[in-house]
Structures are given as C-alpha cells and as structure tokens.
Amino acid sequence: MLSVLRNSAYRHLFTAQVIALVGTGLATVALGLLAYDIAGANAGSVLGTALAIKMVAYVAIAPAVGAIAYRLPRRALMVGADLIRATVALSLPFVDQIWQIYVLIFLLQSASAAFTPTFQAVIPDVLPAERDYTQALSLSRLAYDLESLFSPALAAALLSLVTYNWLFLGTVAGFLASAALVVSAVVPKPAAASEPRTGSAYAKATAGTRLFFATPRLRALLALNLAVAAASATVTVNTVVYVRDQLDRSAADVPLALGAYGGGSMLVALLLPRVLDRASDRTVMLRGALLLTLVFAGLSAVTVAGSGGWRWPALLLTWAAFGAACSMVLTPTGRLIRRSAPPQERSSAFAAQFSLSHSCWLLTYPLAGWLGATAGLESAVAALGATALGAGLLAVRLWPEKEAVEHEHTGLHEGHPHLAGAQRVHNGWRHRHGELTDALHVHP
C-alpha cells in the first residue's frame, strides 16, 4: 500500500492532508475548552450549534465551489483554503463572544468545504492507475481513523505543558504546512471539458447533484451515505452515554470505545486493496451496508440488557464492527465517483458527494441525540437501525448488477480521447464502459 508514496506529488498531497487533519483535531479539543470558558455549563449547546453550522457550511458551500472550481487553478484553490483556515484558527484565541465562535466556525468549515472536494478530485489525476488509486483511498481512510486516535492524545500531552490557546497555534502551523506542501506538489491540469459549461449559476452549482441523480450507482451511493451516517452518528453522539450511563464505566473508557470503532475501520482499510482486486465495488459496498443492519441488531441486545459484565466487551466488538462496515462503504467511494464522472466533471461530482453525505449526517446527528435523550437509547437504536436497513435495501435495488453498457458513438471524430479502445463500425464507434452522465452520453 505504501508504494504509492513513491509518487512525489501524491506524497506531498497526502502529507498535507495528514498534517491538516491533525491541526483540525487540535482545534476541536481547544474549541471545546474555549466554549467552556465562555459559556460554562452551556458549552454543550454552543458546541452542538457549532457542529450544526459546520454541516450547513459543508452542505451549502461545497456545491458552490464545485460550480467554479473548473475555472480556477486547483493548487491555488487548495492553498487559498488552507490560508483562510490558518487565519481563522489564529483568530480563535482572541474570541470572547459566542457569536464570534459561530462566525469563525462557518468561515473555517467553508474553507474546508472548498479544500476537501478539490483535493479528492486531484488524486485520480495524480494516480491514474486503478490499483494505485485504490491504495490511496485506503491510506486516506487510515489517515482519518488515525487522526481520531492521535489528535486527542497529542492534545492531552500538550495541555500538560501549555494552555489550550496554544493548541490553536498548532492548528495554524498545520494549515500553513499543508499549504506549503500543496505548493510543492505538481498538480496535473484537469481534463479539458468537451464543451464549455453553460447555464445559470444555480445550474452550475447543482451539476454534481444532478449527475448523482442521473446515474444509477451514484443514486445507490446516496442511500449508502445515509446508512453510514446512521451508524457513525450512533457512535459519535452516544458513545459517552453508553460508556458512562449504560455501563457505568469511567470517562477513560470513552476514548477506548471510540478507538475500537477506529480500529475496525483501519483493519478493513488495510485489507480492502487486495479484496478490491478480486471483488467489485458493488459487492463490497453493499455487503458493508447490509452488515450495518446486523450490527445494529447486536447493539440493540446490548442496549436492552439490564446488566452483565459481557456488555462492555460486546460494546467494543459492536463499535469495531460498525467501523469495519462503514469502511467497507466509504473506502471505495472515490473509485465509484471516478468511474461515474468524466474527468472534467470530477470536481463537481466530489463536491456533490461531500455535500450530500454531510446532508445525511445533518439528519442523523440530531436524530441520534434527540431520540436518545427524550425517548431512550432503545428508540434511537431502533430508528437508526431501521434507517440503515431501509437505505441498504434501497441501494441494492438502485445499483444494477451489470454496469458496463455497450453503445455506439456516431458524432465523434477519430482520435477523440473517449474513443480509446473503441471498435470501428459502419455508423461510428462501439465500446463498453460503466455509465457516464455527460454531454456524450444520454440516459433515459
């Protein structure tokens, strides 16, 4: 898997991603402490609102950036986003009002909504070989999981030496380092569009979303996003409730439970490159989604059990299984988008995935929290489990088994890039590939 790091451009971009993730993790810890200093016992409400603002920024800003990304140098766009994030992080230690937190969080997450989809759209061009790209996706999944484990530990170590305001400076350093690494990377130019984009600003901003709804396997991906969001919201929102209230364990066991989730995800991310050499994305992703339903059933048993020492190891195993199943769905997602969108539309497609997937979390996060608090964990598990089951079954229905479509092109000249490997027929050219929704392909 590490062989892809021999590519210097990818190595610089991947290192930039890792450093930025660590900086973001430090900011998350520091932001919680800042909210407590300003709001006291209402810090949880402040952080909940900040999380909602984050999701709104992701959902609203990513498509807008996708609409203009094709006009901008991608490296400049990523560097600019990093510099904005560094500036916001540098401002956070001077905040003394709650509304200021909200404004700065919106700016910070808006910049992230510009950086992340652009970064994701660049990697397929840096690593055009399918096997290399698959390994890069697994490394990216590992980076997210390791960050969730490493950043809190690093923050705890730093807080034993300095005040939390210094963590924001660590965040600034992370974003500046990320910007420097992006500058040093050779970023390929995106493929030229087959025809210039036309239409209103709204049409351009929704191009990626319309691509999703027009392509069967991407419609299935929307359902898969919802299934994953149901599971991840359960873990993110209710881990502390399970550990502290349900199982009456110490606060030190909370990160252990979260670590089990990350461990399951990392294990699958390590194994998937070899698995995907033999199995299709469809097989792996749909099985991962349906596995989530079985894990919810196991969690229900842990939840309704009144007592028993077996519940703690069972919860750890359940969380690890959630992480593994989510990774089965999330890791191949980039491959799916790459195969479904023409090169010139990848920025819009990745922006749409970023926005639409976070729309699912915007739904499941409050569902997990509000139902758990008002109706009990049993109701929350039942509702989110039913959501995951319905979404998984819908994905199976939406994603056709045979995806390669044989078809002809009659209006393309010999030597057109799309005709590589096509056979000449009397009316034009004939070939097979997975479904694309662009100017060259029209679907009913």
Image (cartoon, helix red, strand yellow):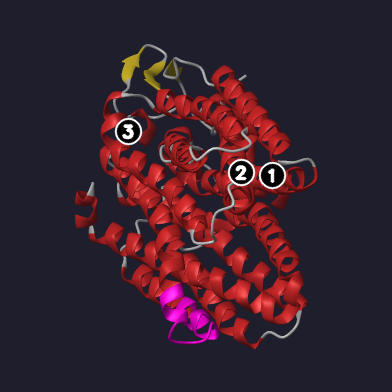
CB atoms at circles 2 and 1 under 8 Å apart?
Answer: yes
- Seen in the picture, residue 226 relative to 167 is either above or below; the reply is above
| Sequence-first tag of 2 and 1 | 2
Residue 160 painted magenta? yes
Q: Residues within 10 Å of mark 3 (few under 14, many from 20)?
A: few
Q: Which residue is mark 3?
A: 415
- Tell me, for residue 234, which label it has, or none: 2
Q: Amino acid at mark 2?
A: Thr
Q: Which residue is mark 1?
A: 368
The answer to whether 296 appears left or right of 379 in the picture is left
User: SS of the residue at dot 1?
Assistant: helix
| Among the 4 quarters of the image, the one containing residue 137 | top left
Q: At 52% from the left edge and 46% from the top edge, which residue is drawn?
A: 350
Does residue 54 show up? yes
- Seen in the picture, residue 40 relative to 412 is either above or below; the reply is below
Does residue 198 show up? no
Percent of width and height locating residue 103: 72, 73
In the image shown, does 255 or 349 lie closer to the viewer?
Answer: 255
| Sequence-first tag of 1 and 3 | 1
In the image shown, does 190 or 365 lie closer to the viewer?
Answer: 365
Percent of width and height locating residue 335: 40, 37
Residue 24 painted magenta? no
Residue extending farthest to the top is 426
Q: Residues within 10 Å of mark 1 (few under 14, many from 20)?
A: many
Q: At 47% from the left edge and 33% from the top edge, which residue is drawn?
A: 340
